[in-house]
Amino acid sequence: MILPVRRLAALCALGAALSPLTACGTAQEPRAVRPTGSAHASVAPSRPPAPVPSRPPTLAPGPAGLTPVFRNAPRTAGKTVALTFDADMTADQGARAAAGEHFDNPGLIAALRALKVPATVFMTGRWAEEYPDQARSLGRDPRFEIANHSYSHYAFTDDCYGLPTVPEDRMRADVERAYTAFRKAGVPDAMPYFRFPGGCYDRRALRAVSGLGVTAVQWDVVSGDAFATDADAVARQVLEGVRPGSVVVMHCTRSAAPTTEQAVRAVVPELRRQGYRFVKVSELIGRASGRR
């Protein structure tokens, strides 16, 4: 005899009360499913919205809208340090490169990769034109970020280490030309950071590039690797100068900075032993601007 569903459930509950070993299935009355639309309608699965790429962190403009200048992150932001490398080549050095002078330094880049050190490379547009394969390789390697060091590496002020000078009305165009050279070389996402050639700038220069939306990046640790012949002295100078949040300026041009690779191989393990973590400039600027 087939018992009604309600009666079967009542008997099952009574048996469970009499003996904890009594096994019972649970009987449920079928429920009607109401259609939400046509019998032939199908509901497409929802998709999460595509992520919006975030713009790299920059600093807010300075007084009167002048280009902001970054030197180091807050000292309270942890033991982080950014190694930066200037890929210098002036617009008139093509003949020297053709004659065999090396303005690149593949050994240094290989060392940074082997040591797993992220870094920011401030590249001139002329360098990207001379070494497009290396520029593209750096620009597509997530361990590095490419920033702007002008196209010509001419100074943006008078009397800057003997460099030729960019006229004020050409300063912005010189920076823009570098970004164009990066794109032509295959660098997909150069950062909105600009380092003045020689680190020389004044209010006039800050005003000239203010419409580009870049942050000017200086440093608080001078490595002294330019034209140095003693790698140990360069390493000591870096180690003595680094503080939490520091930006170290170095070079990746063999002819002008032949000891940099050796110095880096000494600096990196020692700073790690001291508890420092290597980061790109973008992370330090993010900390300084309140972004993480």
Image (spheres, rainbow, N blue to C red):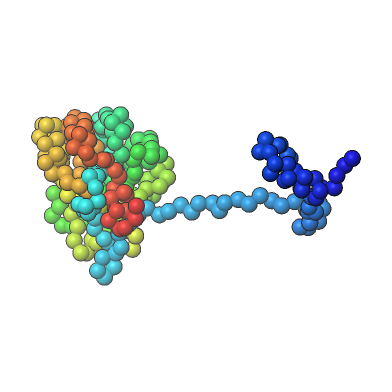
- Residue 4 visible here: yes
Q: Quadrant of residue 200?
A: bottom left
Residue at the far front in the pictured view: 18
Residue that appears at 29% across and 68% down: 65
Q: Position of residue 80 (x, y in %)?
A: 24, 44
Asked whether, in this view, residue 259 is left or right of residue 146, the answer is: left
Q: Quadrant of residue 233?
A: top left
Q: Position of residue 166 (x, y in %)?
A: 23, 56
Residue placed most toward the observer, 192 or 288: 288
Residue at the far right in the pictured view: 1
Q: Position of residue 207 (x, y in %)?
A: 26, 64
Residue that appears at 73% across and 45% down: 14
Q: Position of residue 15 (x, y in %)?
A: 73, 41
- Residue 197 visible here: no
Residue that appears at 78% across and 52% down: 31
Task: Tally the numbered discs.
Answer: 0
Residue that appears at 13% across and 55% down: 159
Residue placed most toward the observer, 35 or 204: 35
| Picture quarter with the N terminus | top right
Q: Quadrant of residue 139?
A: top left
